[in-house]
Image: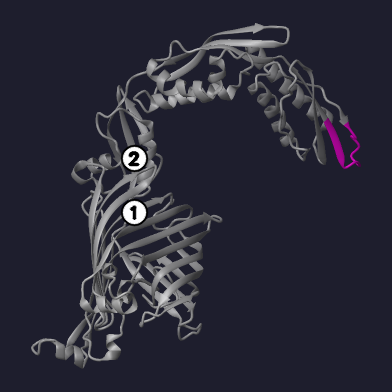
Amino acid sequence: MNTCFTDLKFSITLFIFLVIFSVGKVAAQVELVVSYQNSFEKKLPAVSIPKTLKSLSELKALSTNLIQNLHNEGYWNAKLLPFAIDSLDKSNSKKRIEFIIDLGKQSFWKELKTNSIPNLIKRNVISDFEKKDFLKKLSKNDTNVPVKTQDIKKLQEAILTYAENNGCPMARTNLDSAEIIETEKRLYFSANLTYQSGSFIQFDSLIIDGDAKIKKDFLMNYLHIQQGKIYQENNVKNAVRLLKTMPYLKLNGKPKVEFRYDRAYLRLPLKRVKSSQFDGVIGFLPKSQSAASSSSSKGSNLLLTGQVKLNLINPFGAGKTIAFEWQRIRPESQTLYANYQHPNFLKTNLEIGGIFNFIKEDSTFSIVERRANIAYPSAKFGKIGFFTSLLTTTRTGIIRNADTANVPTADSRFWHYGISHSYNTLDDVYFPRKGFQIITEISTGNKTFTDSLSRSRISDTQNPNAENDFKSPQLKFISEMNLFFKVNKLSSLRLKTQIQFIESKNLFLNELLRVGGLQNLRGFDPNSFFVSRYGLLGAEWHFYFEERSYLMAFAEQAVVRAHTRRNEVYLDLPTSAGAGISFATKTGIFYFIYAMGNSKTQAVSVINSKIHFGLISQF
């Protein structure tokens, strides 16, 4: 086989020599033609070459790849013969080069011995090749199997990958006892595939470099790097993927694996990221007469209003999340949200958590959601979770007349179970420029109407004897996907889609999804639309003038199946567009967005335009 490689080098050198001294610079386009001679096989090899060449560098690269590809197909003695060049006159815009290749005899497998391979690898690796790959033909004594370099390489890589994931990262494979038998038309090749396992390696611990505030025991459990566990190369690769999903850490370089005797240490250069957030505004307003009369006479005549948002991420170095948000903008409306997530529960790979969400809409109704969840974060499949939730809706208004009594709200209980999934490949959690993110949630359960007024309304519109309608199944689905494309060094493009719907036989106003505002439809007031179905497509362009500061412009198109305050159903196509800026300061991230929206209930005008701005303090 050394003779084959010598002939290969000689052919390439001869080709380049002839090109340089016969052609010189390839200033004009050169037409290429390939022909074979001295071929002993009926089926000639197919080679991929460009029809024309424009430069000498392309010609050099082609000469190298052409012979190398033929060698990989088993034509070890293939040679490039001196070629002819037509129309050398510089006045002629075209030249013609004819490649004449002496193929010689092609090499075929006679035998590939695997006796020295351990039985475990034979059962888990080689047996798969014997079922579907080139070894399948060899096992049937087929003499028409060409010796292809990629076949051997693929088999060796599969063996080494198995070894790397079973405690032998230093394993090696080789071909020895090679034998070539030459016949009148062919070369037959036989060899022995050998395997050396090297030292058996186990994980020891992590070595953390940098200023990251993280507990080593937690991080080892989260990354599935346990002391004494068999070394697995996949765990090292998955650790990098899992680290990218942790918003409070950032890799400040490439991880390295250090081997000391029979132990492996994963060295991680980690940088702390300010991910916890605080945003708050508190104010006081005079109480209205109705509000004052309903309260205690000894109470204050001032009404507490404002917004407080606290999001603690990794507060104790163990990856926990504690979130709290309270908002009261109108006197008789407020929201309260609390969330707690605990990863590596009891030193397992499971994450548990709970959510409490309270919404009071004017004096009409209130919604309370209590939710418990359990999830498993996976580097390959993302975070897969299961949850159960109890959602109760209650009318809070006092029915004083027939007109008020027609407001379509109801008292109901919706106990449902669901599955959630999230996955992302973003290069940065907070300021992504490339990658994608997908979040999906689907749940189902039984909804029960608990008050006589709601049941009477259902009976009025349907069969009065259909008591089963008071308890019916309900389906809820939420999905969001974001794609980020890096346009150039300074700009990126974000494409997003959102889909939400809720399906049930009877839907009242206070059971619907609420859409509008900064989170899902800019250019409209928060919760402008009460919807049972909602879809959105949006595009957003970012121009970065600093690492964490950018200008932006966006356009969004939505389609909604909306409901009026009387629960009258209509279809709408809300559209919004706008621009803004986001830049980093010493105290946090300041953002300012100006947006305009158009729908059946809102015309495009400066008066109806919306301004979203705020300062998110990060620590």
The residue depicted at 43 percent of the width and 15 percent of the height is 195
Label 1: which secondary element: strand
The residue depicted at 85 percent of the width and 34 percent of the height is 96
**Residue 82 visible in rendering:** yes
**Residue 222 quadrant:** top left
Q: Is residue 253 above or below residue 373?
A: above
Of the residues tagged 2 and 1, which is closer to the observer?
1
Using the image as rendered, state which of residue 444 and residue 492 is in the foreground: 444
For the N terminus, which image quadrant?
Answer: top right
* Rendered image: mark on residue 268: 2
Q: Earlier in the sequence, mark 2 or mark 1?
A: 2
The kind of residue on which mark 2 rests is: Leu
Q: How many marks?
A: 2
Residue 437 percent coordinates (x, y): 43, 54
User: Circles 2 and 1: CB distance less than 8 Å?
Assistant: no
Using the image as rendered, state which of residue 336 and residue 6 is in the foreground: 336
**Residue 251 visible in rendering:** no
Q: Which residues are magenta?
A: 86-97
Residue 251 appears left or right of 47: left
Residue 116 percent coordinates (x, y): 43, 11
The residue carrying pointer 1 sits among few (fewer than 14), some (14 to 19) or many (20 or more) residues within 10 Å by Cα, namely many
Label 2: which secondary element: strand
Residue 369 appears left or right of 570: left
Q: Is residue 417 above or below residue 96?
A: below
Identify the residue position indicated by label 1 in the image: 420
**Residue 171 quadrant:** top left
Residue 359 appears left or right of 76: left
